[in-house]
Every structure is written in structure tokens, then in C-alpha cells.
Amino acid sequence: MWLAPLMAGLGAIAWMAPSGAASGSGGPAAVAARTQAFNINSTLHLVGRAGHVLNEQGTFTGSQSGTIAIRFTSVTSTSGGATFVAYPSGGSVSGRTSTRGQIVGAKVYFSGSMTITGGTGRWAHASGRGLGFSGVVDRRNFHATTHMQGTISL
């Protein structure tokens, strides 16, 4: 007696399932994300400073080339962070970083991770997590070099 309601319920569930979902045909198709290497080296100079916040601009080369603006919000021996906007051909790529540093003389060496948060133009759907970010800031003149590396999804 209990089998008939169970079979009726299973029939209703099967009727509600999308056509072909069980066989893999006719269901929604997955779209593979395109990926792009993002391995760049930048050379930066100070354009503004407010306390421990450094606003830097410069150029980058590598898998892409263009100009870049980085806002170092903290560069210490224990932690650091930055936001950036890079302008490769065809748009822009934005992101944020989290780093740890080491002070050696007048220089701060840092490394950590980077997250791509968006972009414009051909980079409009850019995203990525766990990319590498490293570099050096010279505390005498605040010139900096950075290296960003990883793969981003477009």
C-alpha cells in the first residue's frame, strides 16, 4: 500500500526534472572560462604620500605591458596591503593584495597573495585568487618594483 504513493511521488519528481538532464543531453551547457597569464614586472615612482599610504605610478612589462597605479596602504615588517589598477591594452585590471614584509636597511621586501577584483574593456570579467605579489620599496625615495604572477579568468 505504501509503494503506490512513493512511486507517484517519484514520477512527479521525474516529470519536474529538465528534459535530458539525467542523460547529459539537452541540459544546460557549461561554458569554459578563458584564462590568461598575468605575469608582469612594474617599476614605480611616488606620486603622493599621506602618512603610511603611498600612491605610486609606473609602467609594467611581461605577459602584458602598460601603465599601473598602486596604492600601498601599509608596508611594514608584519603586514602590508595594496590596491592597484593596471592598464594593459584593451582596458584595465583591478585588484588587491595582502603581504608580509621584511625591512633590510632602507628597503622593505614584501611578498604575498593577490586577488583580481575586476576590469574594463576586454578585461571586464577578469577574476582570480591566490596569485603571487612581491616586490621592494626603497624607503629613501619610495621608488618601488613589483612582480605579479598567476593566471586570471576572463
Image (cartoon, rainbow, N blue to C red):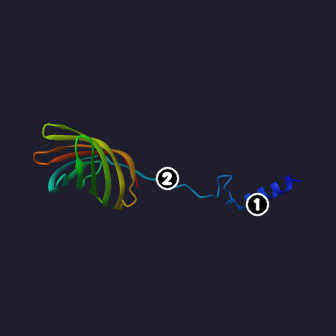
The three-letter amino acid code for the residue at tag 1 is: Ala
Quadrant showing the C terminus: bottom left
Number of labelled discs?
A: 2
The answer to whether 98 appears left or right of 105 in the picture is right
Q: Which residue is depicted at the point 81% across and 58% down?
A: 8
Image position of 140 (left or right of 22) = left
> Does dot 2 land on a helix, a strand or a loop?
loop
Residue at image coords 32%, 57%: 93
Whether residue 109 is visible here, answered yes or no, is yes
Please say whether residue 57 is visible from this viewpoint.
no
Query: Residue at label 2?
Result: 32
Of mark 1 and mark 2, the one earlier in the sequence is: 1
Q: Is residue 115 left or right of residue 27?
A: left
Give the answer, above or below, for where 29 lies relative to 149. below
4 or 149: nearer the viewer: 4
Residue 109, percent from left and from top: 21, 40
| Front label number (1 vs 2) | 1
Q: Residue furthest left?
A: 140
What residue is drawn where x is 19% and y is 51%?
A: 52
Q: Residue at x 18, y 51 (%)?
A: 44
Work out which residue is located at the far top of the displayed protein and give it.
Answer: 104
